[in-house]
Structures are given as structure tokens and as C-alpha cells.
Amino acid sequence: MSIGHTLLGLLESGPRHGYDLKRAFDEKFGHDRPLHYGQVYSTMSRLLKNGLVEVDGIEAGGGPERKRYAITEAGITDVERWLATPEKPEPYLQSTLYTKVVLALLTHRDAADVLDTQRAEHLRSMRILTDRKRRGDLADQLICDHALFHLEADLRWLELTAARLEKLREAVTR
Amino acid sequence: MTAPPGSLLAAENLRKAYGPTTALDGAEFSIHPGEIVAVMGPSGSGKSTLLHCLAGIVPPDSGSITYDGRELSAMNDAQRSALRRSEFGFVFQFGQLVPELTCVENVALPLRLNGTSRKEAERAALAWMERLEVDDLRGKRPGEVSGGQGQRVAVARALVTGPRVLFADEPTGALDSLNGERVMELLTEAARSANAAVVLVTHEARVAAYSDREIVVRDGKSRDMERIV
């Protein structure tokens, strides 16, 4: 997730102080990983340097947490562009698993075991997400659904690969 | 090997062939009271045969199935039927509701067949329909309700007799994601509140994720996924 774009987006509804931004971020997006104050201030100073935000006022008492930030026109354009650009799908998991399966076959280990172990781990995660979804609000449900669909796609790949292990063995040990 | 201690329903070394085709080839299974176990596997792997054997619908060629300490093969047909009527509940992919009866009559049917009065049976049926959030469909016939609603009526019917084991064979197989999810939420909630164990046959991981653990059936052999990690 791009923290910079997310903080910028939060600023679109009106100027906020750094601590206020952190609180809004954590509440909406930080279920698993709340932001550190340091992350907020380093991100804000980068956005400031790039002209995407400006300082809208400083409260008495000084210190970075007293600065109030406002988004600039350039900032709004940046958020717009970010929202309109699709995220790159991440195929890294499959390639790691594929490497493991092929290595297992090449070294005459039980490749089906590699797949089943991963499968059990995936389902364990899916159970946790399903439970969280059941207890959560709509935002939780949508976030969990996204993760669940991805895990399900991985699982389908694991199943298909399990069904094709013999063919794969022939292909890689030829 | 004997049934795992504390298990309600357990199967050991089950073998079943249909002519030259081996459906089960040494499958094992066990479930504890109130537990939800998913049976997964590709189509043709033997998972439905396993369910039919466990429920006493189809006898295995060999192996043992014990329910609450009693050997299923030692019972006669009448005893097995009585067990299915009083201790087991069933939900299939297509609700298999009786089209001529209203929804509440469908849910009340198992109680009526057991000799409960109409009034008493329908009162109990409505209580279950409320839990499955389909009580407003009481007077409708199955043809007048949606697939998801029909499945929830079928779940209410399966639980109305207070079974100790609910067998669910692809209960969301004919539903879209959203309706399937709602059926699974209500089914698992209702089963847990009634402390009914659920044998959940599914090929969908998202459905299996509602279970406590899963076994995978491949080529008639079962694998308990709890034991591999």
C-alpha cells in the first residue's frame, strides 16, 4: 500500500494535523499495521518537498506534531492518477511454490507433501479471515474477502499442480 | 486401529468399489461432537461416497464405521433408518424440498414423520426458520423462493429434529458467492448453537474455511490435514 497516497487522500476532505492523520489512517486502514508517528512525519515532509501538501498552520508549542497540513492542487492530481492506475498483480507466491515443487521433484522428495503443507497453511489463513469477517463490519468484510479470493486462487493452483505432479515430474526430470 | 477417543462418528480403512471402479481405498474419518469437518477433494475422488457410507446410506465393502460406540454394519436396515431419522440431518446441493408443501410444512416434515402433532411440529419448524432468517417464507412453496432461501429452508429442515450430526453435501454448490456465504454463516451458526457436528463435503476452499479442520480425499484415500503441519 502507498502510505503517501493514502495520507494525501485523507487530506482531500480538509486540512489535518499529523496526529490526526495517523489516527484516521489507523482507524480506516491500519487494522493490522498501525502507522508509526515517524512514518507519518517522514511521509509528510516528502510530500511537502514535492509540493503535494503545504503547511496550513502551526499551533503554539511547536514540534512537528503541531503542523497542520493541507493538500495542494498537485496533490489532488497525484491522488487522482494513483486511483486510476491498476495495481500490478503479484505472482511472487506462485513462483516460490513452483520452485519448491520442482526442487522437490528434482531431489526425489515428496512434492505432494510440499503442496499439501502449503494447502493446509492457506486454509488456516482462510479460516482466520472467515472468522474475522463474521465478526467484523462491512469494511472488514471487504478487506477479508479480497484476501480470501487471493488465497482461493492460490489454492486452486495448488490443487491443479497436485493433479499434474506426474506430468511435471516427467517434464522436469527428462 | 480404533476410533479416536471422544469421537462421535469414526470410520477406519473403508473400501468401496462400484464394479471395476474403486471409490474408497482405505479412507479414514473421525469427528467429535459439535465439530465441523470439511471433506475436500476433486470430483470423483470419493468424497460423496465417504459421506454416504458415514451416514449409513451405502454400506462399505469393508472397514468399520462407528457411531457413538456402535458399529453401523452390525445394525439392521430398520435400525440404520431410525438412526438417520433421529440422529442425522441432511442438506444436499439442491434443497430437495417437497414442491407441493409450503416451506414451514417442509421444515416440519421430519417431525411429522416421527409422529409429532402438526401444531407442535410447525411451532418447532418456525423457530428454526427464524434462526435461518426464512420465517417470512412460511406460507410459500419451494418454487416461489430463491435458491439461497430454499437452501436455508433445507438447513432448517435438517436441524429441526435436533440431530447430532449434520451431513452437508455441497450445500452451496448451486449458489452464487454472496448467497453461498450467507447459507454457510447461518448453517454453521445454527449447528454450533445446537452442538451438532457437521460433515461438510465441498470442493470450494471458501466453504471449507467455515470448518474447524479438513480432510482431503484423493483417489479414495483420505488425508487429515491437521496431521501434516
Image (tube, coloured by chain):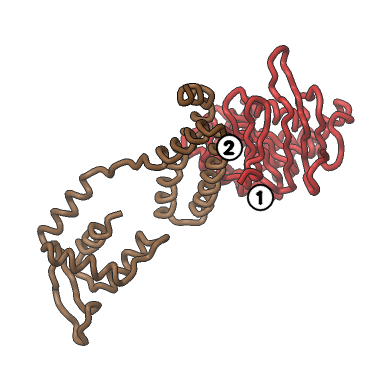
Chain colours: A brown, B red
Number of numbered discs on residues: 2
> Relative to A156, does residue A79 appear above or below in the rendering?
below
Q: Based on the displayed image, in which of its 4 quarters is residue B82 positioned?
A: top right
Residue at horizontal 74 percent and vertical 44 percent from the top: B162
Write down the residue under mark 1: B192
> Relative to B185, does residue A63 appear above or below in the rendering?
below
Q: CA distance from mark 2 to mark 1?
A: 32 Å
Kindly identify which chain the residue marked by label 1 belongs to. Answer: B
In what element is the residue under mark 2? Answer: helix
Q: Nearer the viewer, residue B222 or A27?
A: B222
Q: Is residue B88 visible?
A: yes
Q: Is residue B74 left or right of residue B127?
A: right
Q: Nearer the viewer, residue B189 or B20?
A: B20
Q: Based on the displayed image, in which of its 4 quarters is residue B158 positioned?
A: top right
Q: Is residue B129 left or right of residue B32?
A: left
Looking at the image, is mark 2 or mark 1 nearer the viewer? 2
Mark 2 and mark 1, same subunit?
A: no
